[in-house]
Image (cartoon, rainbow, N blue to C red):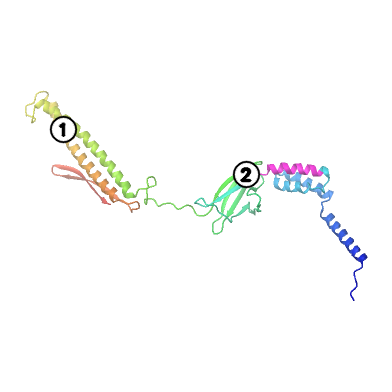
């Protein structure tokens, strides 16, 4: 038959467990000596500009188990240091501006401890090298000089390959037109300039022939009134200006026609177009010939 447990034995066991728990609690609690030591360590670390380590030591001697005087000094210092330790918030993007996740971050080669409650990374004042590593991508380094009290500094970091660049010549960077259409506008513009120049020389030709007609009458009679030298100069100028006007009109018209053809047949992505203007001289005539591959 099973015997019932002795009440006195149960009471003794309960007392032993309570004493053991109290002994463990006293062993975990900081002593006056450890509180004083943490306070001295915090002071030395602060003078060494190691603000983060000084803040941790100050928190260690700010607990209720420490003497009140030490606890008050450590609590005040911990609050001051918390406001001085600089923090950085990094925005991690790819070349297209999308957020990048799963990035490992190190400071001066040491891994950054994740803090779910805040995206900010704390570091001591001074120069630091931050390294960012995304899966399947080369590491990216960023050097920053952090100042005491600079909280929540924002920095952008681009990870991954750069954005694809459109090859030169496949499309105009400013207008989006194909190479052939860009060439068409250029050739057409030169044609307009040629027509304008032809018009100017045509006006000069008309003016010179008008002077000759006034001095010699209709048909440019051989006997002309006035200064023969001036009449001969007007006649010579009229011939020269007339030839220049004709050439300019011919070339300008040809260039405009070529530009129109290029523009109408050009696409947004063509392989290119080339054109060359070649002088053409023959008996009693002169001009320019447009050659090329379009």
Q: Which mark is residue 238?
A: 1
Mark 2 neighbour class, 10 Å CA radius: few under 14, some 14 to 19, many 20 or more: some
Residue 187 shown in magenta: no
What residue is shown at x 74% (from left), y 44% (from top)? 78
Q: CA distance from mark 1 to mark 2?
A: 80 Å
Mark 1 neighbour class, 10 Å CA radius: few under 14, some 14 to 19, many 20 or more: many
Q: Main secondary structure of the magenta part?
A: helix
**Magenta residues (range):** 70-87
Q: Which residue is mark 2?
A: 152
x and y percent of residue 238 in the render? 16, 32
Q: Is residue 216 above or below residue 46?
A: above
The residue tagged with tag 1: helix, strand or loop? helix
- Give the total of numbered labels: 2
Q: Marks 2 and 1: in contact by CB < 8 Å?
A: no
x and y percent of residue 220 in the render? 9, 30
- Residue 27 lies left or right of residue 117; in this view the side is right
Q: For the N terminus, give its image quadrant.
A: bottom right
What residue is shown at x 75% (from left), y 42% (from top)? 77
Q: Which mark is residue 51?
A: none
x and y percent of residue 117 in the render? 66, 50
Of residues 290 and 165, the one nearer the viewer is 165
x and y percent of residue 105 in the render? 61, 53
Residue 85 shown in magenta: yes
For marks 1 and 2 on the same chain, the one whose residue lies earlier in the sequence:
2
Of residues 293 and 77, the one nearer the viewer is 77
Query: In the rendered image, is residue 154 in sight?
Result: yes
What residue is shown at x 25% (from left), y 41% (from top)? 191
Q: Is residue 167 above or below residue 147?
A: below
- Residue 83 lies left or right of residue 189; in this view the side is right
Q: Quadrant of residue 280?
A: top left
Q: Between label 1 and label 2, give the one nearer the viewer.
A: 2
């Amino acid at each position: 038959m099973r015997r019932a447990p002795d009440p006195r034995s149960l009471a003794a066991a309960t007392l032993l467990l309570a004493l053991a728990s109290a002994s463990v609690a006293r062993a975990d609690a900081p002593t006056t000596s450890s509180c004083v030591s943490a306070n001295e360590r915090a002071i030395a670390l602060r003078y060494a500009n190691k603000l983060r380590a000084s803040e941790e030591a100050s928190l260690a001697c700010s607990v209720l188990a420490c003497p009140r005087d030490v606890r008050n000094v450590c609590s005040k210092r911990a609050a001051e240091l918390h406001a001085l330790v600089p923090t950085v918030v990094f925005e991690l993007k790819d070349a297209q501006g999308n957020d990048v996740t799963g990035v490992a971050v190190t400071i001066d080669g040491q891994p950054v401890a994740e803090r779910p409650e805040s995206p900010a990374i704390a570091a001591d004042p001074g120069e630091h090298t931050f390294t960012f590593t995304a899966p399947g991508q080369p590491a990216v380094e960023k050097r920053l000089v952090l100042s005491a009290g600079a909280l929540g500094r924002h920095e952008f970091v681009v990870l991954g390959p750069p954005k694809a660049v459109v090859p030169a010549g496949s499309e105009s960077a400013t207008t989006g037109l194909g190479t052939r259409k860009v060439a068409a506008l250029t050739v057409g513009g030169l044609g307009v300039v040629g027509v304008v120049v032809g018009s100017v020389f045509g006006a000069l030709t008309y003016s010179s022939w008008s002077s000759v007609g006034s001095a010699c009458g209709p048909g440019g009679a051989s006997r002309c009134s006035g200064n023969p030298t001036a009449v001969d100069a007007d006649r010579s100028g009229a011939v020269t200006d007339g030839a220049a006007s004709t050439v300019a009109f011919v070339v300008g018209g040809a260039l405009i026609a070529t530009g129109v053809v290029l523009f109408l047949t050009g696409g947004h992505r063509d392989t290119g177009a080339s054109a060359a203007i070649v002088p053409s001289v023959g008996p009693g005539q002169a001009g320019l010939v447009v050659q090329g591959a379009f």
